[in-house]
Image (cartoon, rainbow, N blue to C red):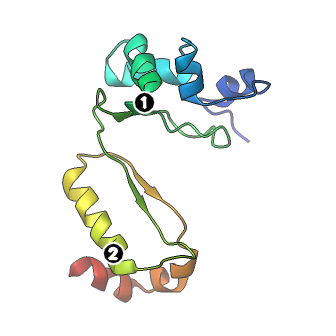
Amino acid sequence: MATTIRQSWVAARQNDTVRTQMHYARKGLITPEMEFVASREKVSPELIRTEVARGRMIIPANINHVELEPMAIGIASTCKINANIGNSQVTSNIEAEVDKLLLHVAASRGCPLMPLSFSGWATMARSVSSTSGWLAR
């Protein structure tokens, strides 16, 4: 497995009981993820830490996904919104998910789209005509 940008950052904190960005921010600690985000956003690491601690910004940084490149979603960041697209055992409505996708694309200015579970749609997703039909409407 290739070394990723966050591999050493996450490994250094592996014995911590709580390993969330909010936990570190509220303790007054600036993580490498916060420093990376600050550089990307062209703001101070302290601003990132403060916003995360206040709950006004998130840094999606799952410790099981060291391959991700940290980014921020929040009031003081360039990205203000996030969309989760997918289905669940409770509900599965491709029309509603496509509507959500189109709204996200129209309003997001390049903010992330988080694809969740699509297992129930595997057959439908393989059908180009079916999927493109939903997107073309």
Quadrant including the C terminus: bottom left
Q: Residue 50: percent from the left, percent from the top?
A: 42, 17
The residue at 29%/39% (across/down) is: 80
Cα separation, mark 1 vs mark 2, equals 29 Å
Name the image quarter holding residue 61.
top right
Above or below, comparing residue 123 to residue 12 in the picture: below
Q: How far across and down, in percent of the image, does residue 18 sit? A: 69, 29
Which image quadrant for residue 52?
top left
Query: What is the x, y in percent for residue 9?
Result: 65, 23
Above or below: residue 75 compared with residue 67? above
Q: Residue at x 29, y 85 (%)?
A: 133
User: Which of the image's four quarters has the N terminus?
Assistant: top right
The three-letter amino acid code for the residue at tag 2 is Ala
Q: Which mark is residue 47?
A: none
Q: Nearer the viewer, residue 27 or 73?
A: 27
Q: Residues within 10 Å of mark 2 (few under 14, many from 20)?
A: few
In the depicted structure, whether residue 80 falls above or below residue 132: above
Residue 32 image offset from top left, x and y in percent: 56, 19
Residue that badge 1 annotates: 55
Q: Tag on residue 96? A: 2
Residue 31 visible in this rendered orientation of the protein:
no
Which of the two labelled residues, at mark 1 and mark 2, occupies the earlier sequence position?
1
